[in-house]
Image (cartoon, helix red, strand yellow):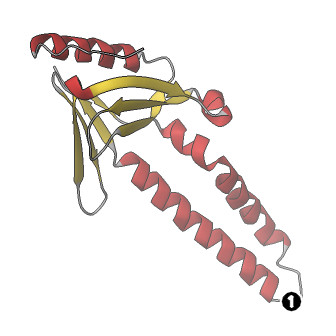
Amino acid sequence: MDISIKPDYKEFMAENTGLALLFFVSLIAMPLLAPVENNYVPIGVSSLSLVLAIVLVVKYVTLTTVVWIVGEGTLCRIRGVFSRHTDYIELYRVVDYSESQTFLQKLWRVKTVSIISTDKTDSTMKMYGVKASFALVQLIRDRVEKCKHEKRIYEITNQ
């Protein structure tokens, strides 16, 4: 059974806390700057607010258009707003995994999972915005081992 994973909205906050705070400060500053005689300051703050709002909307839409699908034999990433781009990694090619959390990701309880493979075109696939409580690495590890066993692929390492 395929498992579909989308980034949690909390990843947006973890990535863009600074921009969001700057946007809200600019919104609060606009009415306070209305009595200023120099019109350039209110216009500048309004323009900044508009640009920040556009940037934040674009980043949110871009974040929400990503989906990862963990299948029985492949790991697939589908992304794109106006066009769609799909990347595949055969699970038997996966060699390592890692989980990481920035400080803001820890606060928002999300993480980034990196899948490292021997694939030439996409050797590292980052899955960001995964809920911190979700054991994604274990799920993928189990499927990788099952896939390697079915295809009779064994690792030989030099130490």
* Residue 91 vertical placement versus 18 (above, below): above
- In the image, 100 versus 14, the foreground residue is 100
Looking at the picture, which amino acid does disc 1 mark? Asn
- In the image, 157 versus 98, the foreground residue is 157
| Residue 23 located left or right of residue 96 | right
Q: Image quadrant of residue 77?
A: top left
What residue is disc 1 on? 38
Image spot of residue 151 (x, y percent): 10, 17
Q: Can residue 7 be seen in the rendering of this structure?
A: no
Image spot of residue 152 (x, y percent): 12, 13
Badge 1 local density, few (<14 within 10 Å), some, or many (20+)? Answer: few
- In the image, 118 versus 70, the foreground residue is 118
| Residue 95 located left or right of residue 2 | right
Image spot of residue 89 (x, y percent): 23, 35
Q: Residue at x 73, y 83 (%)?
A: 43
In this view, the residue farthest toward the left is 151
Q: Residue at x 24, y 12 (%)?
A: 145
Q: Secondary structure at mark 1?
A: loop
* Residue 118 vertical placement versus 142 (above, below): below
Q: Residue at x 22, y 48 (%)?
A: 86
Q: Image quadrant of residue 136?
A: top left
Q: Image quadrant of residue 82?
A: bottom left
